[in-house]
Image (spheres, helix red, strand yellow):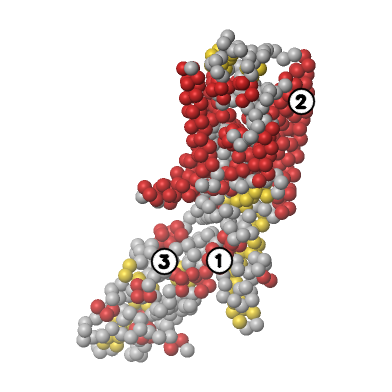
Amino acid sequence: MAKSRFWGRLRILRVALAAFFLAVTTLAFGYAADLAALVVSWLGGDASAAADATVALTRVAHANLAPAILSAAARLSLFGVVAAAVILAATAFLGRAYCSVVCPFGVLQDLLGLLRVWERKSPPQPRLLRLRKGLGATVWAVALIGGWALGLRFLDPYTLFGAIAAGGVLPLLFVAVLVAWRTRFFCNSLCPVGALLACVSAHAPLGLTFTSRCVKCGKCATVCPTGCLDPKAGTIDNGRCVRCLKCAAVCPLGAIAYGRNPGFRLPTRREALTVGGLLAGGAAAGVAARLVGPKAASDALLAQGAVCPPGAGDLPRFFAACTDCRLCVANCPTHAIKPAGPLGVIHLDYADGARCDFDCKRCTEVCPTGALLPLTLAVKRRTRLGLARHAPDRCRAYAGEDCGRCTQACPVGAVRLERIERDGETFLVPKVYADRCVGCGACQAVCPAPGKAIVVEPLPDGAQTLLPLPPPAPESAYQAIYPPGAGSPQRFLAKCTDCGRCVATCEGRVLRSEGRPGSVHLVFDAGMCEYYCTKCGEVCPTGAISLLDLAVKQRTRIGLAELEPSICVAFSTENACGACAEHCPTGALRMKPDAEGILVPTLTTDLCIGCGSCEYPCPVRPVKAIRVRPLPDGVQILAADPNVFFAPTEPAPAPATDDWLI
């Protein structure tokens, strides 16, 4: 009786551990991000902490044998090596407890087995057991050598559980039919992981055995889900036993003990020939799967116009390592990663407005097999997944509408607005610069045109490439005049992608670009920074130009005017010019009499904002008598408020108008 209580408590512990691992794995397939965000927000953390918690939760779910082995083989993952070694070592000493505790698909079979309304009346026949062994050997040979479609893609338990967790009906129906026949038929007949662990567990030093108290009643064999018990012969096949402990719990005499494994017998000649033939056939199928499967799937994917997630590398490598576990599908925050076709080919689907988030690399972090290689965020941002193609015949901007959403959404400045002249009218239309495009799909996601005027197509050979690093900004970049709201050169250079939207929409026509990120600057040879304009901040998609309140923008110093009296018309002649002072909107330039009573421009630097209203109308050629220079350190500051600077008896000048341009 005491021994029965011991086995009962041990079984309760097994069930509790199985429930824990099943819950963690289920959360990893679709709920990890939400749970992590909820817990981290409750603890007062930020979004980065929630992302780290999500990855940590999915890493626990990676402690499954097939993903661990594939991860170790694909990218020499230390976690994969350690996880596989621990599982195999534990199996060598304790038997296949992994199958009834850690494996989510095995635990799911046990849960479905509880719904059975009939009980097994007799243990499986020896011929059926030999057939199961042959099937297991065949599947393992296919999985080991093929490593793709016929092996792990369809029969890996982790992959099947992922398909069920993602809402797959066919995998659930498949396991339900098997469980209705035999609860653990899959584990010892079709599962490649079960076949490997059976080989290890058969040689374990410890195992379940019958004691002399056994009366051969057969109750243990009736409840055994794997059919590993033969009470008439007094033997237990520990290679097939998953340590569910049901037999020990139902034995009325406590005749099942955990002790020294009596070992295994050598197979007969017939069994050896049968298993050998099945192994040879499985090996041939595995070779065919490895040679044909990845290439056929990659060709089909390219023909469908699909794009692989970041970290896939070249398509054959990706398909050889991907088991379609769908952990990346469940954890993609934008739901851009989806399976397709009967093979469940993982790809990026931008059709429903989804996109690959420029600042996200979660799929590369949660992939358990190494099919998606782990990338740093800097490398992921430079990884080209596809190439955007623009169709002008469907573009609203070419029809005369004010659109340009694709240029606002592009995070790398690969889509820029450019001016075109047509029928005497000027249009702002997008243009794709292929050398910058990473194929993230942000442009396609926001395109409002029916059928999409801009779409991301796969690369010709399907091989992802790494865009070169942008050249470092020259020293002259730190002595440029940047748009109001840029803040500092360092900040602006880090955020500006040279999308061209601010250049195209600048009302004063003073913004110019040199064709590289961070090269947008102001030149006052054809206009000035309009005093009442904040459009560059409104259209900037990256935040490189902050949107300032108009009152703040009108006091933001972006440069500093410098007067050269030696060439100024007012200083060299008695001709009263005053064009600079007339158009200065802040009163930084005012005409005042000199010692001889001649009105000359006088600069008050505290009020100057560097808008160029003085430089542009200056009539002196070819070198202007007054020019706006970059700030010494490049950091934009607020100039003095004219309403406060001037004395109450001397009102501030009225803001300049554009009448002089007419």
The crowd level at tag 3 (other Cα within 10 Å; few <14, some 14-19, many 20+) is many
Q: Nearer the viewer, residue 612 or 50?
A: 50
Amino acid type, label 2: Leu
Question: Which is closer to the viewer, label 3 or label 2?
Answer: 2
Q: Position of residue 176 (x, y in %)?
A: 66, 38
Which residue corresponds to mark 1? 407
Element assignment for label 2:
helix
Q: CA distance from mark 2 to mark 1?
A: 59 Å
Q: Residue at x 77, y 21 (%)?
A: 274
Q: Is residue 89 above or below residue 430?
A: above
The answer to which image quadrant residue 590 occupies is bottom left
Give residue 582's position: percent from left, percent from top. Answer: 36, 86
Residue at 61% x, 25% y: name it.
Answer: 223
Q: Tell me, for residue 472, which label it has, or none.
A: none
Packing grade of label 1 (10 A; few <14, some 14-19, many >=20) is many
Q: Earlier in the sequence, mark 2 or mark 1?
A: 2
SS of the residue under disc 3: loop
Residue beneath disc 3: 546
Residue 320 appears in view? no
